[in-house]
Structure formats: C-alpha cells, structure tokens
Amino acid sequence: MKPSEALRLYREQVRRIVAAHHARNACVFGSVLSCDEEEGRDPDLLIGPTPEATMMGIGAIRYALRKLLNLDVDVQTPRALPARLRVQVPSEAMPL
C-alpha cells in the first residue's frame, strides 16, 4: 500500500494519536506529495507541538503511527527540521 493510501485510510486515527500526545496540525510532506511515491516508502509528517509536548511524546507518536500504518514513519516538528528546510517544508506541507 502506498503511504498516501495508508494515511487516507487511517486519517482519523492518525489525528487522534497526534492529539493524544499534545501535538496538532498533522501535515504530510516529501514523497507522499510527489508523483514518485512508491509502496513501502516512509511517509513524512510535520506536527505542531503544543507547550505540553515532550520528546517522549513525539517518539510515542512515531511508534504508534508505525504500528498503525505498518510503515516506517518520520515525524518532525518545524524546529527539528534542518535550517535550510524550515521555510520550504511548512509552506509545502498539506494538512492530513
């Protein structure tokens, strides 16, 4: 299954997992948005952490999403992105 299909199928569960760990605004970026998406590729998610969010919580999001989607999921916050991508990725990311 392509990552975009898995994310579409489990959209509400993904949103609940993100919210349960004090984050919001889950967006996809990277290969999921491009025409060269392949089955088995890892989806990239950008999340907006709330003030209550922790690194452990972000790790828990990643773990829960990997288990739900059966895919290696990359979860990033805007501040965790490399400096050269901090403007580009949030502007191109699409809400889940």
Image (cartoon, rainbow, N blue to C red):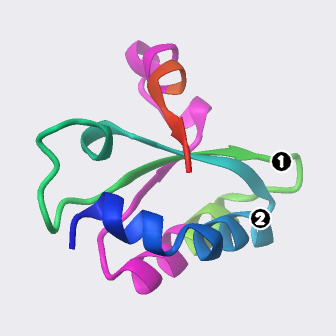
Q: Could you tell me the amino acid type at mark 1?
A: Thr
Q: Quadrant of residue 60?
A: bottom right
In the rendered view, would you say 85 is above or below 61?
above
Q: Nearer the viewer, residue 47 or 11?
A: 11
Give the residue at the far right of this rendering. Answer: 51
Residue 19: which numbered mark, if any?
2
Q: 61 or 14, which is in the foreground?
A: 14
Residue at position x 45%, y 17% in the image: 83
Q: Amino acid at mark 2?
A: Ala
- The mark total stands at 2
In-image side of 57 versus 5 (left or right): right
Disc 1 or 2, which lies upstream in sequence? Answer: 2
Does the magenta segment cover residue 80?
A: yes
The region drawn magenta spans: 62-89
Helix, strand or loop status at disc 1: loop
- The residue lying toward the viewer, choosing from 57 and 5, is 5
Residue 51 x/y as whole percent: 88, 46
How far from the left and from the top, in percent, is residue 88? 44, 16
Circle 2 — which element? Answer: helix
Percent coordinates x, y for residue 72 in the rendering: 30, 69
| Residue 32 percent across, percent down from the top left | 30, 47
Q: Which quadrant is home to the N terminus? A: bottom left
* Residue drawn at x 32%, y 82% as measured from the top left: 70
Q: CA distance from mark 1 to mark 2?
A: 9 Å
Question: Residue at 77% of width from left, 64% of height from top?
Answer: 19
Q: Residue at x 51, y 36 (%)?
A: 94
Local packing at callout 2 (Cα closer than 10 Å; few below 14, some 14-19, many 20+) is some
Q: Does residue 72 appear to the left or right of 60 in the view shown?
A: left
The residue mark sitting in front, 1 or 2, is: 2
Which residue matches tag 1? 50
